Amino acid sequence: MTKILYFLCIGALLISACAQNQAPAKVEVVNLMPAEKQITDEQIHLKKKIAIGRFTNETRLANSFLNEGSNTGSRMSKAANDILASKLAITNRFILIERQDELILDINQQVADIAQYHIPADYIILGSITEFGTSNTGNVGLIDRTKKQTAFAKVNLRILDTHTGRVIYGEEGAGEASTSTSTVLGMGSQAGYDTSLADKAIDAAISSVIDNIVAKLSQDKWRSYVLQQENNQLIISGGEKQGIKVDDVFSVYQRGKTVMNPQTNIPIELPGNKIASIKITKLIPGDEISEVSYAEIIEGQVVGDLSSLYVCEQ
């Protein structure tokens, strides 16, 4: 009788252990390089135009001859583009202009002739997936077995000033994602390779630096440009979608001279001079690129070449 009770207890324990391991595979995402700067929830009045260039894939996986003919590299690049665009859109601070198919720039060099691309944005973000890898680890016991799949990714993001072609900021982020399964006596959760781990790892890598990227993009003042002048009235680029409202007051600046820095051999534009103040009188609807606003000059005067002027916050 004692032996029967003993075996019944052992059987109950085994069944209990198997039941506990029926849970689905556990997924864990980790940002390995947390952002240092935090974004506040303050309301952003004026939205800047940000273009997103195509991500390049510099990983060994993408460039390996074993991967020839596969779309893995391009799929990862597309995923990185979508993730970055989604995270920037969530902030509600920018108007995003995606140029994936039209603009492929080398993020490691200055683009001196960037004007030829006619990018309708203040900045363009260029990205690269620099590292990617996967690993499988596990443990096999007498009656149980565990398995863990891990994907690791590292991304490099740079902000390019579309007016000068210079990289003004760079950030590198890393992240990983993992999924684990376990079985007891052949019972429990089981899974093949989780293809979504790559996207999750890239998401974690971008998430680790997105706060710093947004902080840098928000640092400089919003700008617009004078398109046309009719007596005391100006037509400027931008409208309601950028956050411009009727009765808003802005300053008009004459662009400063461009001088050559002998130390870096890079041209630098000196600060502009304020020449007038304007008040928005009418908004003309359009899309993010075509909308314009009418404004009247309330102080100073606007003369000369309009292409040498820009409109800025007070």
Image (tube, helix red, strand yellow):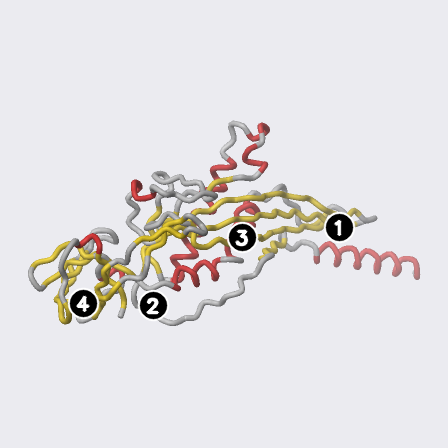
- Residue placed furthest toward the right: 2
- Looking at the rendered structure, the secondary structure element under dot 3 is strand
Residue 44 image label: 2
Tell which of 70 and 61 is nearer to you: 61
Residue type beneath disc 2:
Ile
The reply to whether discs 2 and 1 touch (Cβ–Cβ < 8 Å) is no
Residue named by callout 3: 172
Residue type beneath disc 3:
Glu
What's the CA distance linking mark 4 and mark 2? Answer: 24 Å
Q: Is residue 294 above or below residue 305?
A: below
Q: Judge depth for marks 3 and 4 and give the one in front.
A: 4
The reply to whether discs 4 and 2 touch (Cβ–Cβ < 8 Å) is no
The quadrant holding residue 228 is: bottom left
- Residue placed furthest toward the front: 262
What's the CA distance linking mark 3 and mark 2? Answer: 26 Å
Residue at (55%, 33%) from the top-left corner? Answer: 63
Residue type beneath disc 1:
Val
Q: Quadrant of the C terminus?
A: bottom left
The reply to whether discs 1 and 3 touch (Cβ–Cβ < 8 Å) is no
Residue type beneath disc 4:
Ala
Tell which of 72 and 50 is nearer to you: 50
Q: In screen coordinates, is 85 left or right of 23?
A: left
Residue named by callout 4: 276
Percent x, y of residue 62: 54, 35
Mark 2 and mark 1 lie on one chain; the one further toward the N terminus is 2
Residue at (30%, 68%) from the top-left corner? Answer: 45
Residue at (43%, 63%) from the top-left corner? Answer: 215
Q: In screen coordinates, is 76 left or right of 249?
A: right
The reply to whether discs 3 and 2 touch (Cβ–Cβ < 8 Å) is no
Q: Judge depth for marks 1 and 4 and give the one in front.
A: 4
- Looking at the rendered structure, the secondary structure element under dot 4 is strand
Regarding residue 50, the answer to whether it shows in the image is no
